[in-house]
Amino acid sequence: MRIWFISLALAGLWLAGCTAAPTPTLAPTAAVPATAVPSATAVPATATPSATPTAAATATAPAAPTAAAITAANAASLQPGEPVPAPQIYQMTWTPDSQLLRVGNKEGLHTIASDGRGEINFINTQALTGTLSFAQDGTLAALQDLHTVRLYAPETLQPQQTIADFGTATNIILAPDAGKLAVQSADNIAVTLYDLPGGQPAATLTGFETAAPVYGVQFDANWQTMIWIARATVQLMDVDSGQLGPRFEHEDFVGALALSPDGRILATATSATLNGQFTPIIKFWNAQSGDAIATLPQPALITSLAFSPDGALLAAGTTDGNILFWDVQAQTMITTLDAPVEQVRQLAFSPDGRFLATADQEVILWHVPA
């Protein structure tokens, strides 16, 4: 997952050492999809997107690749699929059955099949130049002129409803099931949740404090936990109660983070001084107590993080185009894969754990041949 509104300008060296404390045992749950949102830009209220299925949408499907679940034992055997060009990606979301990956970029909404067909559908959304977010079924939300959110139906993208009872917003996030919409305020540090399709405000989440001029948020897969992020500070919040958890402070800006599927481990990517040298690191935290579990030096700056659905693996994308795989329990690096890209900006495991999607200027689905 990548963090928006935060930029990194760091240099780092690989250190062999690592400090660790005992790690809680992880229980398998659903994967945490990656999310990412661009800066908002005002657009005309009358702009309307268009849907255009690709030629592949009607083609006969080839035999689906036989893929095994990705584990510590076979991660080194991951093979890349055919790249799908998609520059300037802001979000990747898998469908619950792991058959489709939806990818949003500056051109539109791409649908990629995991059965080997590649891109099977494309919806042009270039008329909507504000902040966009979409659900697993393709429902699209657009923040237009910073004061209005419009919701569009899947595939046809016909306007469904408008929400405009908030002040100025900087960001929106649509829940995976399209049942809730989060609107991030520019007027104060607050996020308002709206129930959909009704469009009524359900709650306003506040209490996070920062001296930084910018902040961002993201959610876990089930929208039970919201994660506040402001430069070097991260804090979790229970969505139902609005109760804040511990604060996680870092020496430098946090460039990526991921919450384990069971909500017990928070992984953050940043840089820190180790043995007198400023070094890229991944840090494991106990999400409930706030205690540091491990500090893991990295060979390059980390741009994205994603836990496997069972929480056993952590994939990390780097600025030099590599994918690093860490055994979460053992806190050891398992393998490094060289992705055919300049850097790995986003990562997303499929819910069944058989595919790993990576993104830079193109999307690649990786799998382990069974």
Image: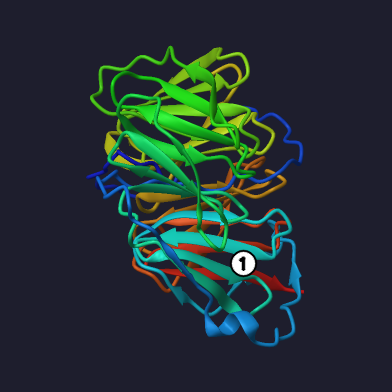
Residue at x 33%, y 52% (from the top left corner): 46
8 up-or-down from 114: above or below: above
The quadrant holding residue 238 is top right
Would residue 217 appear left or right of 69 to someone viewing this image? left
Three-letter amino acid code of the residue under disc 1: Ala
Residue at numbered disc 1: 76
Would residue 29 appear left or right of 250 to someone viewing this image? right
Q: How many marks?
A: 1
Q: Position of residue 130 (x, y in %)?
A: 32, 48
Viewer-closest of 286 and 41: 41
The quadrant holding residue 190 is top left
Residue at x 35%, y 50% (from the top left corner): 301
Would residue 149 appear left or right of 210 to someone viewing this image? right
Residue at x 73%, y 33% (from the top left corner): 25
Is residue 317 visible in the rendered image? The answer is yes
Tag 1 secondary structure: helix
